[in-house]
Image (cartoon, rainbow, N blue to C red):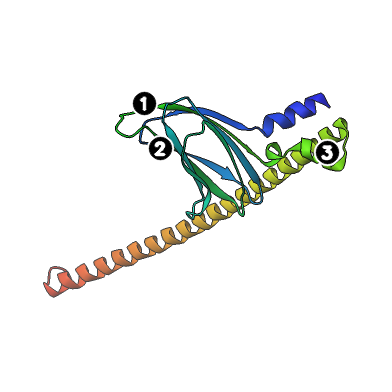
Amino acid sequence: MKSLVIFLSAIVLAHSLRFYVPPKEKKCLKEEIHKNVVVTGEYEFSQGIQYTGSIHVTDTRGHTLYKRENFADLKGKFAFTADEYDIFEICIENHPPAGHPGEKREVSLILKHGVEAKNYDDIAKAEKLKPLEVELRRLEDMADSITKDFAFMRQREEEMRNTNESTNSRVLYLSIFSMLCLLGLAIWQVLFLRNYFKSKKLID
């Protein structure tokens, strides 16, 4: 049981990142999320007097999922649900005080999605579950998430295989067509040169 928990926890992990954002600039991170998956994030800026920050979460179609600009708080949270499989971009900006060149600030970002984003304490209170039942529910959700991931990877593999087979077929047909064109051109050249030499009476 314990080894199963460790195995599942190793597959479904939260992403914890630390990076620096230069003054008056922004840094963006991209995350690939499946359909109907809940994503939560916690961010924290290092201390900076009169500094502000901005965070903007968008999808590939340019839709804004979360936006907070010029805030002085050092910490914050956001959450959204992916309507479809997509790659989401999280951009963080560092705004120094007006008239000040500014300094880079360290940002801590913790992203959780799927099972890790669920609050099992609230579920336990709502459904009056025992600790063991909560852990079993969490394991069940993890197993379901992993099964969906494997099914998605198998689907992607099939799509890639079909694409490769289609590409190979097209390359084969193109190669045959090219060979026929070259053969036809070679025959035409031979006939043309033969007629030319005959017209010049160089050959019989």
Who comes first in sequence, dot 3 or dot 2?
2
Q: Residues within 10 Å of mark 2 (few under 14, many from 20)?
A: some
Q: Badge 3: how crowded within 10 Å, few (<14), some, or many (20+)?
A: few
Query: Looking at the rendered structure, which numbered label has been put on residue 125?
Result: 3
Q: Quadrant of the C terminus?
A: bottom left
Q: Nearer the viewer, residue 98 or 130?
A: 98
Looking at the image, which residue sits at the far left?
Answer: 200
Amino acid on which disc 1 is placed: Glu
Q: Which residue is mark 1?
A: 103
Image vertical order of residue 158 relative to residue 200, above or below: above
Label 3 to label 2, Cα distance in Å?
Answer: 40 Å
The percent position of residue 41, horizontal first and vertical second, equals: 59, 38
Q: Amino acid at mark 2?
A: Lys
Q: Residue 198 placed where, x, y %? A: 16, 73
Give the SS element for disc 3.
Answer: helix
The reply to whether callout 1 and callout 3 are in contact (CB within 8 Å) is: no
User: CB under 8 Å between callouts 3 and 2?
Assistant: no
Quick check: 105 left or right of 114?
left
Q: Which element is circle 2 on?
A: strand
x 69%, y 36%: residue: 116
Tell me the residue at 83%/35% (across/down). 134
User: Quick one: quadrant of the N terminus?
Assistant: top right
User: Which residue was labeled with disc 2?
Assistant: 26
For marks 1 and 3, give the CA distance: 45 Å
Q: Is 191 left, or right, of 197 in this rendering?
A: right
Residue 142 at x, y percent in the picture:
75, 38
Identified at 33% across, 67% down, the residue is 184
